[in-house]
Every structure is written in C-alpha cells, then in structure tokens.
Image: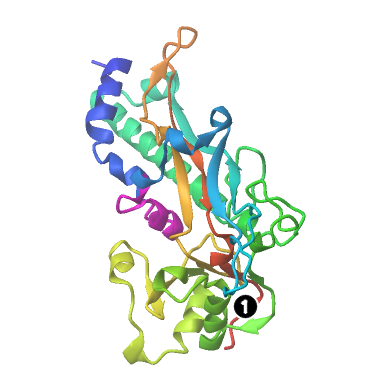
Amino acid sequence: MALTLTEVQAITNDYVLKKKAEDIVFQDSVLLYMLMNDGKFQDNLVTAGELVDGGERIRVILEYAKSNGGTYGNTTKIPQAKVDILNAARFRWAGAFGSNAIDLDDRRQNSGDAAIVDLVHAKVNSIRKTIRDTLGDQVYAQAVNGDALLGLGDLFETTTSTPYGEIATDDMADWKANVITTSEDMSFKVMQAIRRTAKVGQNKSDKPNLYITTDLMKDAYERTLTPAVRYQDTKLANAGFDNVLFGGVPVVADDKQSAGILDALNTNYLNLKTHKDFAFTDIEWEGSREQPDTWVANQRWSGQLVTSHRKAHCRHTNLTDPT
C-alpha cells in the first residue's frame, strides 16, 4: 500500500528528524559552528527585550563615549553638563530557506513504502543542507538584497559614509571597520599585526578568539611553526575542523572564505541572533487541493549576524603564500 501524506509526515517527524539538533551544528561551516554550537544558539534567540519598533530591527546597545572626568583638587569645579554615552546599532532581519517537493511522478516511480521513505529522507536532508549552505555563503559576503545576512563583507566595509547597523563611521569614529589591505606574505609577524589591530583590551576576552582563512593561507602560516608547537584546538578538531593555534587561538580554513583573506574575529562581540519563531522551523510536508499528489516541505530561519564592537574584529586582504 502506498504511503499517504499523513504517513510521510509521521515518518518525517519520528525518524528523519530524530537528530534535529544537527540542523544548528553546521559542521561544514566553522564560523556558524562557533556561533551556534554549545548552547550559544539558545543564548542568541531574540527575546522581546531586544526588539524595537514593533520588532522591525534587532537592537544592540553601544556605549560609545565617556562621562565627564579629569583631575581633582581644592579648587576643582566638577562639570555638571550631561554627556550622552549610549547609542544603539540597529540591524534589520534576514532569512534563509530550503524547500523541495515530491510530486506524482515521484510517487509513481518510487512505489512501495521503503522507496518513498528513502526519497523523503533524501529530500529532507537536501533541504537541511541547502539552508546551511545558503547561510554559510552569506555569513562571509556582503548582503545582496534586503533579505540576506549582513555578513562579514558588511562588517568590514570601509566606506565611512556607508551605514552598518544603521550607523556610519562618519557619525561615530569608534564604529570603524578594521581592514588591512597591505600586500604581504603570510607569516607569524603578520598574524601578530592582525591581533594587535583587533584587540580592544589586554584581557584574553578582548582579543580575537577565531581566525578564518583559506587552506593556502593556513598552510602558509603552519609552515612558520616548528612541528613541536603545531598544536590545535581539540574541540574544533573533534568537530571535523582541522586547525593550528596562534597564541592559543585556532586558525581554521573555510572553503567559503575568499582567496588572500584572513578574518580575525572575537565571538564575544559577534552573534548570530535568531528569531524564536524561525529557529530552523520543523520540516513538515503539505499537500494542496489543486495538486493532491504533490507534497511540499520547507525549512526557514530568520535572524541576523550582529556585532556589539566593530573594532574587535579585523580583516587582512591581499595575503600571499611565500613559497
């Protein structure tokens, strides 16, 4: 007996998606893995307190100025003027989806319960991989439209009149993007310069905790190390991400990273915020009255990549392999 839509839906929920947590692990994207793994995904669900203007934007509070201050003595007159110290970056919503369908031809050609189950499993896995791949592309790029992520291409946009988070560097100097464009061979010294540029304090938490580049640049950096000190972050390695350490911080290659680029990121100031109602929605098959033998399913995500400290990150372009 051929499976019905109800039975396919039950199979999808009970078997195909029984490892649903894999939807947010992103083992094919190191940056998404770092931003969404180990409970950080739950921390990044957007709550009502983070929404403004009826939920039109994700708001990130910034402390951008100091209060009155100075030396103090017998004749000091303490200023009474008010100083504005707070502002907010406002990030629009972005989203991604994956979808597929099973139609009449599929049902006729894949006869038998097992055949339909295998087809459902394959298409569900494809939906999940597609939405991950879409986000993996967008997280490094500049947004191509008003629904795409504001990726690292936007975070590292150096045109001072171009707003990021609705704030332009022309209006807030400390909201500048750190980008090094000097043509240089990859080396330990270059890595030190990148770290200095991105650090916002001397505490470990104020320095980059993730370096993402290409295979070529990672290999070039690794060759500068002696075999005895080529340690790696075991947590990332166990998740499938080969890496080598710089100052105790992993340097990882990602196929979606552009040639000649290394991004130094501090995930203490970088978050992938997710709308609680669109946190990788369940994949549910649906039919229509007009086409009762066509079953469609999709998965949707909505949120945005945001930063609370733009200067805590640095991008180096024009890196080359010295060999």
Q: In x, y percent, where is residue 192? A: 52, 83
Taking the spot 41% from the left edge, 54% from the top edge, the residue there is: 35
The picture quadrant where one finds residue 30 is: bottom left
Taking the spot 67% from the left edge, 41% from the top edge, the residue there is: 145
Q: In x, y percent, where is residue 58? A: 54, 40
| Residue that numbered label 1 is attached to | 319
Which of the two residues, 58 or 114, is positioned nearer the viewer here?
Answer: 58
Taking the spot 37% from the left edge, 65% from the top edge, the residue there is: 241
Q: Is residue 182 above or below residue 48?
A: below
Relative to residue 134, is residue 75 drawn left or right?
A: right
- Dot 1 surroundings within 10 Å: few (below 14), some, or many (20 or more)? many
The picture quadrant where one finds residue 257 is: bottom right
Judge whether residue 4 can be spotted in this image: no
The coloring applied to the image is rainbow
Q: In x, y percent, where is residue 307? A: 53, 54
Taking the spot 75% from the left edge, 59% from the top edge, the residue there is: 160
Q: In x, y percent, where is residue 265? A: 50, 65
Relative to residue 77, is residue 309 drawn left or right?
A: left
Q: Amino acid at mark 1?
A: Leu
In the image, which residues are magenta? 26-41
Which of the two residues, 24 or 59, is positioned nearer the viewer here?
Answer: 59
Judge whether residue 76 can be spotted in this image: yes
Q: Under tag 1, what secondary structure?
A: strand
Location of the N terminus by quadrant is: top left
Which of the two residues, 120 or 30, is positioned nearer the viewer here?
Answer: 30
